[in-house]
Amino acid sequence: MQVSQLLLEEPMRLASILESSSTQGFSALTKIIGTLGPKSRSVETIEAMLNAGMTVARFDFSWGDEDYHQETLENLKKAVKNTRRLCAVMLDTVGPELYVVNEKGTPIELVEGEQVILTPDKNKQASSKVLPVNYDSLAPAVKPGDTIFIGQYLFTGSEETSVWLEVTETQGPDVICKVKNTATLTGSLFTAHASQVRIELPTLSASDLKIMSTWGVHNQIDFLSLSYTRHADDVRLARSHLSKLGDLCQTQILAKIENCEGLAQFDEILNEADGIILSRGNLGIDLPPEKVFLFQKVALNKCNFAGKPAVITRVVDSMVESPCPTRAEATDVANAVLDGTDAVLLGAETLRGLYPIETITTVRRIAAEADKVFNQAVYFKRMIKSIGEPMQHLESIASSAVRTATKVSAAVIVVFTSSGRAARLIAKYRPTMPVICIVIPRLRTDHLRWSFTGAFQARQCLVVRGLFPMLADPRHSGGSSNESILKVALDHGKAAGIVKSHDRIVVCQKVGDSSLVKIIELE
Ligand SMILES: Nc1ncnc2c1ncn2[C@@H]1O[C@H](COP(=O)(O)OP(=O)(O)O)[C@@H](O)[C@H]1O
Ligand SMILES: C=C(OP(=O)(O)O)C(=O)O
Ligand SMILES: [K+]
Ligand SMILES: [Mg+2]
């Protein structure tokens, strides 16, 4: 497998970098996921986040209860209605996460060289001497010399509110540690991470299962973000649970790779999941720092070749407190796009940051600049070569649509789809122009009632690079009205400023039994 920076090879005049970026039309091809929380839950703020380019909202159950998240979601629904912008809903599980509850909420000072005890005794109050952890079997799992990290919920890893501990010994169920850096733990919830230690807790906790069947079903979640996926079986089990939850049989599973166990099983997990979240927050402390970039490049490449969406996390942490990213962060976002990410997931930046809207705008602008210099020609050739021949029918149609669109400099590709499969296959070839996905609803029954598919499938396009879904009116489904639906889509594209008179459009659809790729030129 070839992994290299996919940057345009043409000589670029450095002065051209000074030209201002276009702010019109379909912002960036790269998608943006925002975690909603205290700083991002009013209708007004969410509307601004949608207008800035957020396409998926993440509800992280590591923090906040069902009522809290429901209130936020009701506001999201209002914001979607007001802005007329689609937004997918992602439920993020707690999983086998280690945490420390700081009931009193008062800051806890830890001093380098001193001792602190991690205990499973939940009756103990968190203090600078003892920290109660939610896991009974930590002592038998660790050995002297192991590293344990403890930080504020949605830590960045570098702040003075995070601490590194070294295990010195265990005493019964307690783990005695030496503090490696002076820090002040703040907040009411700290996440703990024992580096490269197997945690014998289920990937879906009892509380995760309950929330999926209540909150998840009630809100028709589009994505399950499966925290700490360590094995393909974790994905299979989650799928089996979802399949018993009515409409959630349509929910997609994004497996979060957060530690070395998940990394070691990556290929098998990718095979089972609908997409991958590269959880650089946790993985960034489980892996030595010099290895993180390598995981990112190889994993993104594997997702791209599998035609499954990839998401990276923890990109502009410093924007929690600053309206501008650091140079390293700005460069990191662009590199992630060049490495092949579909989407960027914002955590602390939108949940508790001071600049949730500015963060989305900044990430979108950087991603849009990177989109422009992505070397699609080289990427396309590699993809075609890797598929080999004979190609599957639809693979050939999808790649032809992208090739045709490139050759005629089409403004957009329009694809008809019901399951979303054709749209994802087109995205796999990374077209440089937006792809309007017209999702045609299909009637389905579970032998109790009839319903239409389409809503899940349309929103699930919102995590895939370059896809811009539109849900067609079910009353218009059926071959003969496809022309009128296409007209609606193009009018919509015109209004959004991505298509204009005399533009060429490539359309991918089925007429009768034949799949076809056609070029149309607007009058
Ligand atoms: N309702 C539709 N009308 C016209 N063409 C369609 C429709 N649904 C899918 N297609 C086309 O059929 C082919 C198969 O697409 P795919 O997304 O796999 O279909 P499905 O939604 O049935 O899985 C593609 O060429 C796609 O553009
Ligand atoms: C997104 C991540 O996980 P969490 O759910 O802890 O935010 C991460 O570790 O990067
Ligand atoms: K989580
Ligand atoms: Mg994590």
Image (cartoon, grey):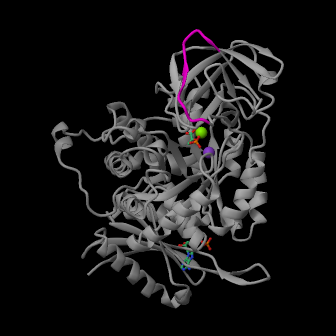
Residue 308 visible in rendering: no
> Which residue is more in the foreground, 299 or 221?
221
Kindly identify the residue that appears in the image at 51 percent across and 57 percent down: 57
The quadrant of the picture occupied by the C terminus is bottom left
In the image, taking residue 79 as reference, residue 238 lies left or right, namely: right
- Magenta segment: does it hold 83? no
Question: Range of the magenta residues?
Answer: 104-115
Residue 407: x, y in percent?
35, 61
- Vertical order, 159 against 271 (above or below): above
Residue 159: x, y in percent?
46, 27
**Looking at the rendering, which quadrant does residue 448 occupy?**
bottom right
Residue 509 visible in rendering: yes
> Which residue is more in the foreground, 400 or 20?
20
Please state the quadrant of the image where ligand 1 appears. bottom right
Residue 207: x, y in percent?
74, 51
The quadrant of the picture occupied by the N terminus is top right
Kindly identify the residue that appears in the image at 48 percent across and 39 percent down: 314
> Which residue is more in the foreground, 509 or 318?
318
